[in-house]
Image (spheres, rainbow, N blue to C red):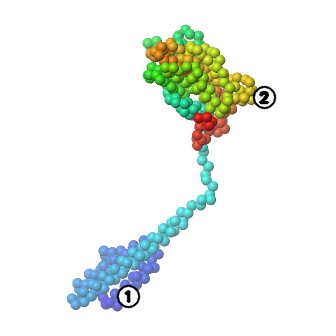
């Protein structure tokens, strides 16, 4: 092929490459020219047939044309790729002015919220958290707590019993969180300082009782723990939980089989105008039961009552949550009514709402 002809071929090819509008066509041109069986590649085969004195020159020219094509294809390819990318970016543009799609948000159940707040307060005071099973032995729930089989206190508990086993042992749905006192004292050596939140069960149902409810139990055992510690700890707890700095509190003598002496703690409130207001007024509201752990209970747990003593308390969580959050009926806690949960539930993004006291 003459130099002139070759130049013509090369010019046409370069113009064609330059005008290619998409990557697929460009690839087709590449294969048809400098590909294995492309037109330029084929021309190399004519070198051997040319007169010897022309072969070198022809080879050089062909190589030059091939390089020009390669360069042009590469440049066009980069150019087309960039165009394609820009088109894609333009098509993917996000309209940030669009309003977001609403997402349903769950809420924290007031019982969980109350437990979180209570644990935050007690943990700050140095208590650890213990738990126990819902199904208990008769021994842990009653006997070890000084409530032997014929004790009248058993009647008050409206116990759910599980079917009796062959050996005569009877399991119960725990009627209070107090059996975790026994479990802890049997498995740990004093000093002990725990709180126990959990589910409890009694056959009872009205606006202030549900067959399943929650309690938080406290137990402190050490060498010199006394009634003053009990009072200080519980007054501090109630003031922080209800967020009332000078909350009036009093301890009334009471009776529990597992404490001696026993007391019930009342906090000051006002019932003026039909509404209940914690912390103000001259009325009293019972809030929890407490006392010094009975030496016989320590004995049941193999703790030497001549060396150790301590206090315990038990508080109903529903009642405390009703008072703090203004919930009028206890049964609604367990109705699973989504409208109720939206109204009384707490945002998961808020930390426990405990007053500055902690
Ligand atoms: N277990 C008691 C109940 O359910 C509450 C209670 C009272 C717990 C006094 C205690 C306590 O630890 O010392 O009625």
Q: Which mark is residue 167?
A: none
User: At 32% from the left edge and 90% from the top edge, which residue is drawn?
Assistant: 3
Task: Judge from the rendering whether residue 97 lies leftward or rightward of residue 57; answer left or right.
Answer: right
Give the residue at x 39% y 73%.
27
Percent position of residue 228, x then y: 58, 21
Looking at the rendered structure, the secondary structure element under dot 1 is helix
- Return the x and y of residue 290 as percentages of the image width and height: 59, 20
Left or right: residue 172 compared with residue 77? right
Q: Secondary structure at mark 2?
A: helix
Question: Residue at point 41% right, 76% down?
Answer: 75
Q: Is residue 153 above or below residue 93?
A: above
Q: Nearer the viewer, residue 33 or 348?
A: 348
Q: How far apart in space, not on screen, are marks 1 and 2 (Cα)?
A: 106 Å
Quadrant in which the N terminus is drawn: bottom left
User: Which label sits in the foreground, 1 or 2?
Assistant: 2
> Quick one: 29 or 215, which is closer to the camera?
215
Determine crowd level at label 2: few under 14, some 14-19, many 20+ residues with C-alpha closer than 10 A. Answer: few
Query: Which residue is at a point 32% across and 83% down the rendered structure image?
Result: 64
79 lies left or right of 346: left
- Distance from mark 1 CB to nearest ligand 1 atom below 8 Å: no
**What residue would you read off at disc 2?**
273
Name the mark on residue 8: 1
> Looking at the rendering, which quadrant does residue 256 occupy?
top right
Cβ–Cβ under 8 Å for marks 1 and 2:
no
Locate the C terminus by quadrant: top right
């Amino acid at each position: 092929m003459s130099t002139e002809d070759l130049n013509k071929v090369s010019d046409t090819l370069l113009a064609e490459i330059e005008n290619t509008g998409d990557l697929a066509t460009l690839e087709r041109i590449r294969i048809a020219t400098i590909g294995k069986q492309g037109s330029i590649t084929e021309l190399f085969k004519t070198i051997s047939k040319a007169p010897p004195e022309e072969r070198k020159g022809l080879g050089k020219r062909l190589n030059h044309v091939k390089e020009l094509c390669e360069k042009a294809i590469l440049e066009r390819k980069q150019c087309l790729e960039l165009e394609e990318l820009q088109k894609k970016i333009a098509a993917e543009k996000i309209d940030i002015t669009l309003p977001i799609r609403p997402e349903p948000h769950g809420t924290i159940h007031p019982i969980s919220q109350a437990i979180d707040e209570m644990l935050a307060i007690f943990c700050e005071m140095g208590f650890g958290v213990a738990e126990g099973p819902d199904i208990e032995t008769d021994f842990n729930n009653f006997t070890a707590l000084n409530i032997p089989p014929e004790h009248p206190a058993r009647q008050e508990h409206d116990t759910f019993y599980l079917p009796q086993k062959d050996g005569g042992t009877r399991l119960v749905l725990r009627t209070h969180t107090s059996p975790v006192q026994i479990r802890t004292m049997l498995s740990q050596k004093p000093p002990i300082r725990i709180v126990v939140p959990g589910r409890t069960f009694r056959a009872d149902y009205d606006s202030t009782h549900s067959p399943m409810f929650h309690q938080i139990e406290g137990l402190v055992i050490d060498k010199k723990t006394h009634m003053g510690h009990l009072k200080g700890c519980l007054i501090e707890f109630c003031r922080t939980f209800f967020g009332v700095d000078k909350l009036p509190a009093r301890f009334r003598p009471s009776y529990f089989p597992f404490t001696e002496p026993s007391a019930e703690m009342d906090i000051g409130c006002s019932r003026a105008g039909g509404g209940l207001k914690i912390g103000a007024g001259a009325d009293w509201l019972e809030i929890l039961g407490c006392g010094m752990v009975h030496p016989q209970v320590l004995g049941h747990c193999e703790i030497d009552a001549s060396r150790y003593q301590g206090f315990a308390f038990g508080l109903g969580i529903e009642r405390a949550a009703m008072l703090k959050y203004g919930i009028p009926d206890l049964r609604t806690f367990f109705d699973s009514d989504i409208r109720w949960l939206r109204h009384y539930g707490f945002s998961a993004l808020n930390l426990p709402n405990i007053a500055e006291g902690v």
